[in-house]
Amino acid sequence: MDSEDRHSKAAEAELVTDPEERARLEAKNGIRQFDHAIDQIEYWLQPDRPFKLRPSAIMSLNRVALDGLSSYAGVYRPDAIAIGGSKHKPPPSYLVPERVEELCDYVNTYWVRSPVHLASYVMWRLNWIHPFVDGNGRTTRATSFVVLCVRLGYRVPGSNTIPEQISQNKTPYYEALEAADAAYDEHKKIDVSAMESLIGTLLANQLATILRDARADQPRRAGSAPV
């Protein structure tokens, strides 16, 4: 599947129509969204704060991603949405709140499961729901990373993070989503094994940057510590 084929289509009045200005704001918001995700991770890693994934946390990540770009930033889509290049049809808008609650319940109920499984489940299921008019992929990847780090009990070190790697090459990510979609849509079975494999590989890549940096002769500039 071509990495540019799978994209959301929803009817909405965009706040910014100039392509260059929109790209600039998307890039700026992308940095802000990741910083917000890190803030969530650090909050939940504080002692005596048992983690609960809430819809409000997911919505806040979307709000930052679409700030200044959409009148629906941080709120659920009010209408149907289509995913170009995918056979999957997201649920109707009136079911979105319930489906997001179910997603959160799954993560909170099965918190004893592996970090990679929970992150993979979020990566697939939130995309499956497609709860927002735009920024679903970005919000999903940020939420998945939050769940991964909090379940691990520490912020994953290294640069070229999992969300960044997916943005650089989305084809394996789309293929893993399609595999999980097919298992659920055809058999009502949760099977995120392809996504688990992908996230495991991307996690290894992120951690490998630590060894690369440790072997580098050129010292890092002050303030340029890896994410």
Image (cartoon, rainbow, N blue to C red):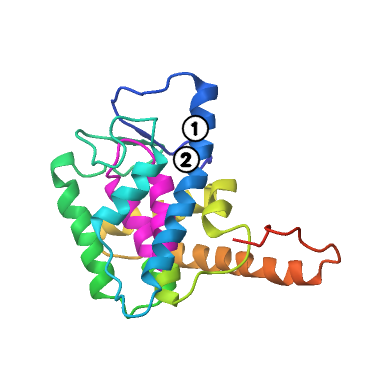
Image quadrant assignment for residue 121: bottom left
**Marks 2 and 1 in Cβ contact (< 8 Å):** yes
Residue 214, image x, y percentages: 76, 72
Residue 25, numbered label: 1
Q: Please say whether residue 142 is one of the residues in the magenta stretch.
A: yes
Q: For residue 15, which numbered disc appears in the image?
A: none
Which residue is located at x 29 percent, y 25 percent? Answer: 12
Question: What residue is rendered at 29% in x and 48% in y?
Answer: 59
The C terminus appears in which quarter of the rendering? Answer: bottom right
Residues drawn in magenta: 119-147
Residue labelled with disc 2: 29
Residue depicted at x 59% and y 47%? 168
> Which secondary structure type mostly characterizes the magenta part of the structure?
helix
Q: CA distance from mark 2 to mark 1?
A: 6 Å
Which of the two residues, 13 or 38, is positioned nearer the viewer here?
38
Q: Height in image: 1 above or below 17?
A: below
| Residue situated furthest front in the rendering | 222
Q: Is residue 75 above or below residue 127?
A: above
Report the amino acid beneath label 2. Asn
Asked if residue 39 can be seen in this view, the reply is yes
Residue 198, given in percent of the width and then of the height, sits at 51, 62
